[in-house]
Image (cartoon, rainbow, N blue to C red):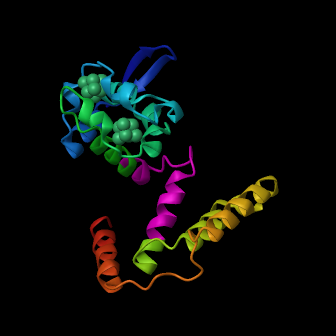
Amino acid sequence: MTVRLISERGTESADPAFTQEVLGASAAHLERCYQCQACSSGCAFAYIFDYAPHQLLRMVQLGLKDRVLESKTYWLCASCETCATRCPNDIEIVQIMDTLRHIAFREGYTKQTPLPLFHRTFLGGVKSYGKVFELMLILRYMLTSRDIFKLSELPNNMKMGFNMFSRGKLAVLPDKIKGRANIKRIFQQTEKKNG
Ligand code: SF4
Ligand code: SF4
């Protein structure tokens, strides 16, 4: 069931089932939020978000599913927990951000930022090598996102790559860690569980 809300955008659809899903999946006590904004005033990343954390939470409470899931905020959240530490109501904001990422992946709200692609590429590398292999991560990401073809950015990217390489931050070959098979098994079990 959807309901219509009057907002600064005119009328907007609200989906109470979305609010219930976030409330149920995260057990983060979103219902306790009274908009004091302590979370947002302590968030070091809020300046790059399209909605501050307290705004995003209010939109989830109201069931503004499209507006929430089309936002970049939950993708850009660094999961640093500063907001949760400051929250007087012990709301687990990072859990809510994680829940939103899961719903966004499931329902295809991944176009607004390249971060979902970056997450996938990062996890693919961990699955293959057991840990991050930065050189492969950068190459795979740039090829998949087609950023490698942005010629105007090529000089800067090459300069950054050279600087990282000269400071020993980019290995040419991956580290051979112990327990790669265990890590692959963890991925297989998770993939099976998530269908
Ligand atoms: S600090 Fe907690 S109660 Fe205050 S706005 Fe943020 S989430 Fe809501
Ligand atoms: S966990 Fe996310 S929302 Fe909270 S302070 Fe850190 S970056 Fe901001």
Vertical relation: 103 (above or below) 84: below
Residue 114 % position (x, y): 57, 51
| Image quadrant where residue 56 sits | top left
Quarter of the image where the C terminus is located: bottom left
Q: 2 left or right of 72?
A: left
The quadrant of the rendered image in which ligand 1 is seen is top left
Residue 169 % position (x, y): 56, 68
Q: Residue at x 60, y 66 (%)?
A: 138
58 and 165: which is toward the camera: 165
Q: 40 left or right of 45?
A: left
Residue 132 % position (x, y): 46, 71
Q: Which residues are magenta?
A: 103-124
192 and 77: which is toward the camera: 77
Seen as rendered, the residue at the extreme front is 167
- Does the magenta segment cover residue 80? no
Quarter of the image where the N terminus is located: top left
Residue 25 % position (x, y): 23, 46
Magenta segment's dominant SS is helix
Seen as rendered, the residue at the extreme right is 151
Q: Does residue 59 appear in the picture of this structure?
A: no
- Does the magenta segment cover residue 113? yes
80 and 192: which is toward the camera: 80
99 and 44: which is toward the camera: 44
